[in-house]
Every structure is written in structure tokens, then in C-alpha cells.
Image (cartoon, rainbow, N blue to C red):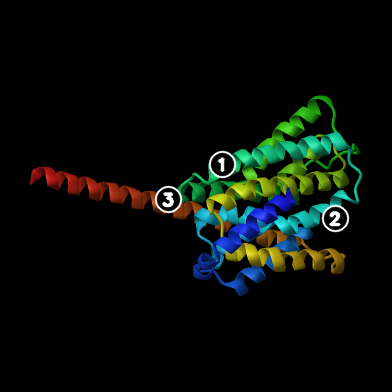
Amino acid sequence: MAVCFLIVLIRDLIQNKDKIAKEDTSYPVTGVIGFVTCFLDTLGIGNFATGTALLRAFKQVDDKDLPGTLNVAFFISIMLEALTFISSVEVEPLTLGLMIASAVLGSWLGAGVMVKLSKKKIQKTMGLALILVALMMIAGKFDLVPAGGTAIGLTGIKLVIGVAVNFILGALMTCGVGLYAPCMALVYALGISPRVAFPIMMGSCAMLMPVASIRFIKSGAYNRKVTIMFSTLGTVGVILAATLVKSIPLGALQWVVIIVVLYTSYSLLQDSNKSNEEDNNKKEKQSEINDQIKVD
């Protein structure tokens, strides 16, 4: 799947090299954002929330292209993280396979919906999604998320619940909701060992992202410059975080991220409301013009 993704991506970049040159996006700015977000993601601070906040703050991506950009641009760095965890942690194969497969199916269906949404609806969807992300982060800070058990796999009704919910999480990831936090809460609640949770989370992300991303690429609903920089400097961030950083105090930084995510959510919802007002004004003006034409 990763090979198919790379073939589709490279072909699209080559075919649209003229459009890339015209994109109003800064290589240096997006390179720094990609490095920072992927570095933090490796340490446990999800890159979808931070990526959304920073890309909007520096006006690097149109809101309509945000979902596709996040999924396409972060794939290579997340695949690298997934390979690290899956190869080093024991997990029951059936549980891992079914949960990954359900997330992949959810992402395929979710991407099909997202590429058809208007900019206004994407702003509203992502604004609400980021509130959910912030609430999950706050729950983790106050230890409201279950601590997990000792199991390395699921059976019976727990397996059915895990597969069903991961399907929903896969669909939500295509609209900007990072899968890490909610998936971790899910497997913890079902009694999975905290250590085993990582290959399930990382594997789900790594496998669902190329499936959703191919749909975003084919529809052109992503930023190509951001993808180039995130795929290169973002990978450097992952490698440095994994090899050089043994421990870092993340408590205060996590609160900063929560505040930034909530502000970004507010700004997205506010822009969505502005779009509604603009649409209403246009309809009123058009109605007045039509009435004037009838009078004449």
C-alpha cells in the first residue's frame, strides 16, 4: 500500500509541477512546521492538531485542503514511527489485523465524503473535531482515560467493539481528528496493555493514511508544497526524536498545545460562520436584483 501511495504521489507531483510553482506556500516555513510537528508526534503529541494550528497560523494552506494535506503530508513520517513500534512490541495478530482493517475501511469512506464537502463545511467539521481532540488531551492530563490492562489481544464482544469503534476513528481521521488519543482510550478501556496500544494506534494510522490519501491526491484536494517539505524534514524530525531524545518534560508543552488547538477550533468555527453570513448576503443581493428585474 505504501508503494502504491508513493507511485500515485510522485506521479501527481510530476504532472502538476507548474501548479506547485504557483502555490502561495513557503518552503522554509512549511519545512520548519513539518520538522517540529513530526518531532513532537514521535514524543506523543499528535501532529494533526499541531499541524492544523501551525499551518493556519502561518496561512500556508487553504482550509478546504487541510484534511487532505494532513493525511498526505504526514504519511511517510507516521509510517516510519509505525515500523518502529510494530517490530518491537508483541501483539495478538488477529486483533491487530482486524482493527487496522476497520480503520482503513473507515478512512476510505471518510475521504470520499470529505473531498465533496464545501470549504464552509470543512471549516465547521474540523473546528468541532479539534474540540474533541482538545477534550481527549485534557482527559489524559487529568488521568480520566482508563489505565489499560495486561492483554495483548481482544476476543468476543470486546473485539467486535474495538473493530467497530476503530472504523469510526478511521473515518474521523480524514477530517482532521488524530487517531492516537481516541484509539489509545479505546484499547485501554478494553483491557489492552498500554505497551500493546502503540502498534495498534501506529499501525492503524500508517495503513489507513495511504488509502485515504490516494483519494485526496486524485481529487487534488491537498497542498503539494507542504507535502514535499513534511515528507522530507518531517522524517528528519522523527529520526532525531527517536534516536537523540531520551526524555523531555512535555507537561507544560501539552497545555500550550491544548490552548492552541482550542483557539484554532474557535477560529475555524468563526470563519465558517463568516462564510454563512457571506452566503446569506449574496442570496439577499441576488433576491433584490431579481425583484428589481421583475419590477422593470
273 relative to 51, above or below: above
Residue occupying the point 85% across, 55% down: 84
Mark number, residue 273: 3
The residue mark sitting in front, 3 or 1, is: 1
Residue occupying the point 71% across, 59% down: 254
Q: How far apart, in angstroms, are the residues tagged by discs 3 and 1?
A: 24 Å
Q: Using the rendered image of the protein, determine whether residue 259 is visible from the camera's viewpoint.
A: no
Q: Secondary structure at mark 1?
A: helix
Q: Amino acid at mark 2?
A: Thr
Mark number, residue 282: none
The residue mark sitting in front, 3 or 2, is: 2
Give the x, y percent position of residue 110.
60, 41
Q: Secondary structure at mark 2?
A: helix
- Residue 14: which quarter of the image? bottom right
**Left or right position of 1 against 28:** right
Reading the image, the residue beneath label 2 is 84
Give the x, y percent position of residue 4.
70, 50
Q: How far apart, in angstroms, are the residues tagged by discs 3 and 2?
A: 42 Å
**Depth order, front residue of 1/144:** 1
Reading the image, the residue beneath label 1 is 112
Farthest left residue in view: 296
Q: Earlier in the sequence, mark 2 or mark 1?
A: 2
**Depth order, front residue of 12/207:** 12
Q: Amino acid at mark 3?
A: Asn
Q: Using the rendered image of the protein, determine whether residue 88 is visible from the camera's viewpoint.
A: yes
Residue occupying the point 89% across, 41% down: 91
Q: Secondary structure at mark 3?
A: helix
